[in-house]
Image: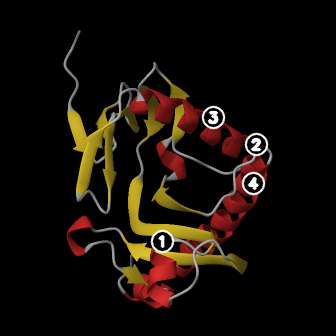
Amino acid sequence: MARRRQIYEGKAKILYEGPEPGTLIQYFKDDATAFNAQKKGTISGKGVLNNRISEHVFTLLGNIGIPTHFIRRLNMREQLIRQVEIVPIEVVIRNVVAGSLAKRLGLEEGTPLPRTIIEYYYKDDALGDPMITDEHILAFGWAAQEELHDMADMAIRVNDFLAGLFAGIGIRLVDFKLEFGRIWDNDYP
C-alpha cells in the first residue's frame, strides 16, 4: 500500500492528500481533548463513531441544500472530503446558557435563551480562540460582508434543522460550533 502524504493533524482528525486534485482523506482519531487540549486522553472507538455520525449529519445537511465538504465515507475511520480554503473563524451557535457563556455573563447554566445567539471566535489555538465581532472579521479580511451574512444564515438553518433532528431522539441542542471553508465553483466539475 502506498504511503499517503499527511497534510495536517489536529486534535481529533488527520488530513491526508486525496486521490484526486481538490480532495482530501479525513481520518478520525480516538484522541479526546477538553479545555482547549489542556486535558487529553484516548477513547477506544471514538474515531469510528465520529466518522459515522459525521457522515450521517453531513448527508442530511446536503439533502436540505446545505453545502458541505463531505463527499463519501471510505471506511470505518475515513472520509473523502473536498479540499477547502479555511475561513479562520469558529461560529458558535447557542440555544441554552452553558459553559463559557454562563461564566462570562454570570448566567445560570441550563437557562433557555430567548433567541438563538451566534458568536464568532478567531481560529487560533495559540491565542485561545479569542471571541471577535463581525467588525474584526471585516476589518482583518477574514471574510467578506456577503460571506459573513451567508455564514450566519447557514448557521441558523443548520441550528433549526439539528435542533429538530435531535429533539426527535430526546436530545436538547444546547450549543455547537461550525467552521466554514471556501470552495471555488470552477475548481470542481
Closer to viewer: mark 1 or mark 4: 1
Q: Which residue is disc 1 drawn over?
A: 99
Type of amino acid under label 4: Phe
Q: Which residue is disc 3 drawn over?
A: 56
Q: Residues within 10 Å of mark 1 (few under 14, many from 20)?
A: some
Q: Residues within 10 Å of mark 2 (few under 14, many from 20)?
A: few
Q: CA distance from mark 3 to mark 4?
A: 13 Å
Q: Earlier in the sequence, mark 1 or mark 4?
A: 1
Type of amino acid under label 1: Gly
Q: Which mark is residue 161?
A: 4
Q: Quadrant of the N terminus?
A: top left
Closer to viewer: mark 3 or mark 2: 2
Tell me whether circle 4 and circle 2 mark residues in contact (CB < 8 Å). Answer: no
Tell me whether circle 3 and circle 4 mark residues in contact (CB < 8 Å). Answer: no
Residue 160, by quadrant, is bottom right
Element under disc 4: helix
Type of amino acid under label 2: Ile
* Residue lying at 49% horizontally and 52% vertically, measured from the top left: 183
Seen as rendered, the residue at the extreme top is 1
Q: Residues within 10 Å of mark 3 (few under 14, many from 20)?
A: few
Residue 143 visible? The answer is no
Residue 101 at what x, y percent from top left?
50, 79
Between residue 93 and residue 33, name the one nearer to us. Answer: 33
Element under disc 3: helix
Q: Earlier in the sequence, mark 1 or mark 3?
A: 3
Q: Which mark is residue 169?
A: 2
